Image: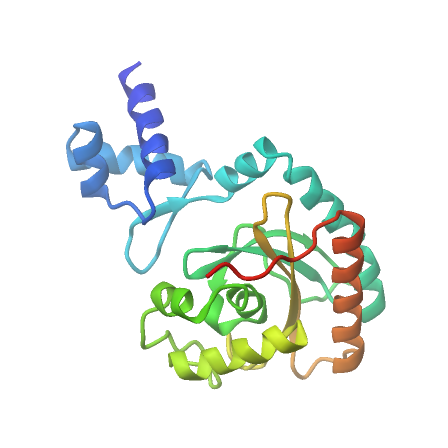
Amino acid sequence: MKVAQNTIELIRMMVRSKEDISVSEAARQIGVNRSTASRLLATLRDGGLFDQNPDTQKYRPGMLALQLGMRSRSSFNVLEWITAQAETVVQAIGHTVCLGVLDGADVMIVATKRRATPIYLTLDVGTCIRAHASAMGKVILAQLDDEAVRALLPEPLDKMAEMTRTSHHALLEDLALIRKTGYAISHNELANGISSYAVCTRLKDETPMAIGVAYLSNENHSDEYQIVSSLLDFKKRIDRELLLVDKPVRR
């Protein structure tokens, strides 16, 4: 019974915390030694409720927690609906479509609609990618004001590939353009040889969600105009049919 109580208290701690949780902080909060806290956190991580930042080893909400939260707010059914509707984009451009939400400085993939071919580039559900280095991440960051972006992503930004933006100045220039065009582009920023495009919609609880595609740069693919047009048309249809109209950025 004590284990269950401590586990529940850790979940409550995660809900209240605005930052990732360390083993030491967890141990102090529930009144156990570090070894016990570490085992409880690892169990929650393995079960999907928590996720562990590979750089800091601290814990943050995991995919299962995200799904549970969405379901409790009646947004998860919306996510399933958007994923099903994404088949139209997959058919139009021939690439797998991924949906993602901001998770700290990362974007977490929450759903995918794969193209029906044996060879494709995709990101598994639950995968986290650096927001500043991906089209999906940048299109969500563009929903924030510049000061919020600076606070979220300390300089220097992690260099993931040849063209990764590593300064606030370079990244904010990209975000300013995204706010004008309504879509984001990433070439050789997340990984060399990878290109991606993304647009942003919102779930019913106003959580910004990216809709994106990624492919190998040397792969035979639709041209940029077709990809962007298909994604923008899809965003408009989703916003219209679900009444998910974007609101001005809160400053």
Q: Quadrant of residue 208?
A: bottom right
Task: From the top left corner, tell me how far across and down residue 230 is, in percent.
Answer: 80, 69
Q: Quadrant of residue 25?
A: top left
Judge whether 9 appears above or below 221 on screen.
above
Between residues 48 and 10, which one lies in front from this camera angle?
10
Task: From the top left corner, tell me how far across and down residue 30 is, in percent.
Answer: 22, 28
What residue is drawn where x is 54% and y is 34%? 68
Tag count in the figure? 0
Residue 166 placement, left or right of 87: left
Judge whether 93 appears above or below 18 on screen.
below
Task: From the top left corner, tell me how far across and down residue 81 is, in percent.
Answer: 75, 44
Q: Is residue 185 visible?
A: no
Judge whether 243 appears above or below 152 on screen.
above
What residue is drawn where x is 23% and y is 34%? 37
Q: Is residue 209 visible?
A: yes
In the picture, the quarter occupied by the N terminus is: top left
What residue is drawn where x is 39% and y is 78%? 168
Task: From the top left corner, tell me how far across and down residue 251 is, in percent.
Answer: 46, 61
Q: Quadrant of residue 56?
A: bottom left
